[in-house]
Amino acid sequence: MALRLLLLLPALVAQNQPTFYAAWEDGRDAERHGHWAAALAAYQRAVALRPTPAARVIIYGNNLLEGYYPYTRLARCNLELGRLDAAASALAQAEREGEPTGEGHALAQRLAALRPKEAPARDAHPRDAAPAAAPAGAVQTAPPPAAPPHPVPSPAPAQALTPAPVQTEPRLPVRQASAPPPSRAAEPAPVLPPPAAAPVPPPPVRQVPWGLLGLAAAAAAVGGAYLLGRRRPRPAADAPVFGPYRTERLLGRGGFASTYLARRDGDPSPVALKVLHPFRQDDPEFQARFRQEARLGALLDHPNIVRILDQGQAEDAPWLAMEYVEGRRLDAILRETSPLPLARVADIGLQVAEAMASAHARGIVHRDLKPANIMLVGTRVKVMDFGIARVVDAETLTTTYAFLGTPLYAAPELQTLTQVGPSADAYALGIILFEMLTGRPPFQGDTPFEILDQHRRTELPDPAPLRPGAPGPLVGLIRSLAGKDPGLRPDDARILAVLGALVRP
């Protein structure tokens, strides 16, 4: 058992690496474009997933990332954002973690130049000190007044000061009460009649040309609708170009490729452009699998499968142009609304089963079916990412990437077999149906090891008590799909029959 877990360790470690690598690459992309706040947030996510820097970090399978030094990157982002204290803290952490000091030294010099310099200590000015006792008979003069905090008009030239007699106690002058001066007899002012108010003319009444105003409003509405209909975001001047496609924004990043929203020259329709990561470009085996994805995807033409439209290579970067689907992923929906209504569970399951049956008929197995690869566009379901799909009888790929699924939905045979059949997708569908029906996956654990071991050894919990009122045929189908023996799981025809009867009784 220990030997088996040891053999699975590289593949299991790789499960969390794409998320870490995605955060790191997001930060690098944002930094290259000068988006320092976005870069800072991305690097902070990377540090949360992998706090220890290293010169070589396993990213995916047997692939390595050279030079993971996140605290130096955090220091630069904070410095560019003017957060000097945070930059100093990140530089100190980088030094403690042993990151290379070259760039850190340059950042430290910039930080020292930006910090406000402290004023040097000065001797107390004589006028600031307490006046010393004057010898007897000496004449004392008043010290000059302190400078006012705000500019004031220049005072008149100072007068010569004369000695003033010393008074022991200042006395205020006493004002003597005096009778008011005698007033003269008031002379009556002449009474004048008030001036007559001038009549105010009424404001002129303007005639509104309603006919012209209506025409202008109609023309403005039509013109605005036309402009809004034709308006679409313009790509940035430095947006990457791959073949005839110009990218507009990053849609997501996976373990081996980034996906961009892009448009073909002369065509306003958007596409999803998947581009191989640079660190994969020197891996012949992985490039072969990427090209295989394009060939297999071109064979799949089904309303419930995202289509591959085009493929090519630009500067050693293979790319795929896929149908752009704008909707919501099933995993996001399950996080907000779970469990789903019974009718919705059966309908989603049926559409996924129809997509899988079409792929299996062409000899293609998805191998990584999960809620994150299921997109909902209204009531339509689209299955995405056949990126690790494999022809059932293919022998061109070695076992380097033998385990590429996701532990929560991985069939037991994926842990031990290089080649798997359609029954692996049937198992994943059963786990997805269980989660939609009950609101949680059947097998959970603190580590991928625990989850995978449960898939191999632990029987599926009975979904009926967890979802009272669930149809018996649906419960029975889920239990048979999640069986440990691949040969005993129902085939595509049986799955379609059971789910079809629930959706269209």
Image (tube, helix red, strand yellow):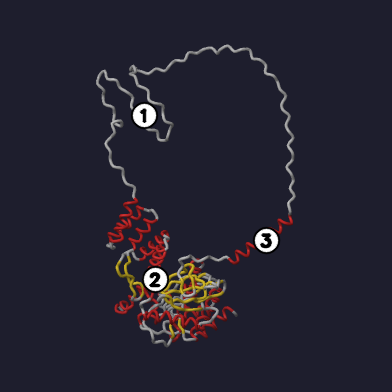
Q: Describe residue 351's horizontal placement relative to residue 457 as left or right.
A: right
Q: CA distance from mark 1 to mark 2?
A: 70 Å
Considering depth in this image, is 498 or 359 the residue closer to the camera? 359
**Where 426 sits versus 169, above or below?**
below
Hey, which quadrant is residue 232 in on the image?
A: bottom right
**Mark 3 residue element:** helix
Label 3–label 1 contact, CB within 8 A: no
- Near mark 2 (Cα within 10 A), the count class, few <14, some 14-19 or many ≥20, is some
Residue at 52% across, 86% down: 493
Q: Amino acid at mark 2?
A: Pro
Residue with the mark numbered 3: 219
Q: Describe residue 98's horizontal placement relative to residue 273 as left or right.
A: left
Residue at 47% across, 83% down: 296
Q: Amino acid at mark 1?
A: Pro
Seen from this angle, which residue lies furthest left?
Answer: 135
Residue 311 shows in the view: yes
**Where 196 sits versus 188, above or below?**
below
For residue 18, the mark is 2
Residue with the mark numbered 1: 145
Residue 462 shows in the view: no
**Mark 1 residue element:** loop
Residue at 33% across, 27% down: 143
Considering depth in this image, is 303 or 308 the residue closer to the camera? 308
Percent coordinates x, y for residue 300 in the rendering: 51, 82
Percent coordinates x, y for residue 386 in the rendering: 46, 79
**Where 19 sits versus 301, above or below?**
above
Q: CA distance from mark 3 to mark 1?
A: 72 Å
Q: CA distance from mark 2 to mark 3?
A: 53 Å
Considering depth in this image, is 454 or 263 the residue closer to the camera? 263
- Near mark 1 (Cα within 10 A), the count class, few <14, some 14-19 or many ≥20, is few
Q: Nearer the viewer, mark 1 or mark 2?
A: 1
